[in-house]
Amino acid sequence: MASERLDPPNLPDFTILKRLARDQLIYLLEQLPGKKDLFIEPELMSPLDRIANVSILKQHDVDKLYKIDNKPIYTNADQLCFLIRPRIKHVKNIANLVNKDKKSKISRKYKIIFSPQKFHTCDMILEQEGIYGDVTTDEWSFYLLPLDDDIISMELPEFFRDYFLEGDQRWIATVPRALNLLNSIFGPISKIYGIGRCSKMVLDIWQAYLDQEESDRKDRKPEIGHVFMIDRDVDYVTPLCSQVVYEGLVDDIFRIKCGSVEFGPEVTSSDKSIKVLLNSQDKVFGEIRNEHFSNIFSFLSQKARNLQSQYDKRQGMDIKQMKSFVSQELKGLKQEHRLLSLHIGACESIMKRKTKQDFQELLKTEHSLLEGFDIRESIGVIEEHINRQISPIDSLRLLCLLSITENGLIPKDYKSLKTQYLQSYGPEHLLTFSNLKRTGLLTEQVPGETLTAVESRVSKLVTDKAAGKITDAFSSLAKKGHFRGISKRLGLIPRVDGEYDLKTPKDMAYVYSGAYIPLSCKLIEQVLTRKGWTGLEEVTRLLNGNEFAEQISDRNSYSESQRIILAVFLGGCTFSEISALRFLGKETGYRFVFLTTSITNAARMMESLTETKS
């Protein structure tokens, strides 16, 4: 098999997307000539920093930069520019400032730049506040931020809550616009596969764009072959599992934001925090990011030895050789040494937290839930976790994983676990449980669904207490969850003799210690292998349908591009899924590019649905 393996094709150069976004922003700023103060929404600060840093903004007459918060705005500038998401609270904030200036007879120019687009509601607010004619508005079509060579983020973390909880479709149109931009630069894309209601809506809007622009895309060498779109609610199990690949762990513990992470004093071994950009330019990180954590220390120690041997080359050099070494190699070695010490520090910090008994027990519980064994014992562990008040987010995550793998909790368990959670973490979480129920993450089995003739006959022959236990047993038998059915049909739980080999893995399950192959990744693998959904009818039925396979262009026959797959995650993508598909790409000769509304993990998902005291 290895001899037949194809080398993955080269990736398109996505840095052009940054240049396009930067040029458009500069153009919009120059529409307000002269010195101006720029007010930026906090959520846009990190993405903006990746596109245009402070010095670029200063070159285009931006005098001072401010972060928009809920405090009143004070400035002496004659021209004010606001860079915001289309949110009502920000528009009202700006309206308050303009109206205050009007009362004080202060004359200024105001410009609002909405990113990635302006909603009709924003114009309505401007009209209601009486400032529609006093401000100019524009759109910065900043849909795509390349975080790395193969990861593009839309930086819309609110997409998940807005659509999957609230049913709000306002962000959906941004996805086909983003896809259309990619298609116009790197297309024509030949085929699009997908599953999920949101994905289907995106496809319909995108096809309308494609029909309008049919004549514009002739004689171009395509760089992307296929697209696979998937809704986050098709696979909730994967983001709920603890991540064990290095990049996933760094995200879980230190929170990777917009492609960079801040390592605190416990990692840097100093009294300062250091912000580090995590991408393939970091040679150390590039080699360990997709590795299972158990392999990381041996790699880093080997890397340290190699670096030392390169430093040792200085011994015995003459002056000419030393000059060459200093000018060509030393700077690179010092940079690599700095990064190596940071990643060793990060690993030590992770080890301190992850070798605790609690974490090992939680992993064992997760694996039991995925496999469907020892469910009562797992519920006991979750109860202990809740009652010891270890972490409200982790407790919720485990409850949701239990619910999805068991296709809902039996009423007795649901009531008991909910009561214990509310007593431990506060009654305001009643709203949290309501949110989780609406998204389908934590549900209660409908009473009476599981009652069978056999059960009712048996219960007549035994005492009430025993009858309750029998009802429990029958309910878990009768409600063979959808996850169990999907897992069995797709082989998501690997069957291995002996211990799973994490050093040289055979499948994508290594990203969860060999316990589980991510459902989202397995679906992509199966559809690409079968070139469609044929033979997966039973699986799609259990996933509530909405699958599709559409030929959108017959002009892409260029063989290299056919092996470049754009995997689109609507509602967020985890680093574990990215690592799994990178592994699949190496094994099959495909190259995956990831487009996601945002990077997510269990904590981010739970936090977006959690209601706390305001």
Image: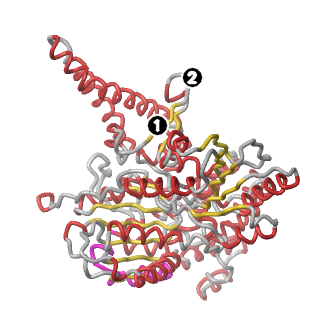
Q: Name the residue type under label 2.
A: Asp
Give the percent coordinates (x, y) of residue 412.
70, 69
Does the stretch in magenta take in 200?
A: no
Residue shown at the point (87%, 50%) measured from the top left: 104
- Amino acid type assigned to the residue bearing label 1 in the image: Val
Q: Position of residue 141 (x, y in %)?
A: 52, 63
469 relative position to 542: left or right: right
| Closer to the camera in the image, 360 or 83 | 83
- SS state under label 1: strand
Highlighted magenta segment, given as a residue range: 525-547
Label 1 environment density (alpha carbons within 10 Å; few <14, some 14–19, many ≥20)? some
Horizontal relation, residue 534 to residue 377: left or right: left
Q: Is residue 402 above or below residue 307?
A: below
Which residue matches tag 1?
A: 276
Residue 498: tell me if it is visible: yes
Observer-side mark, 1 or 2, equals 1
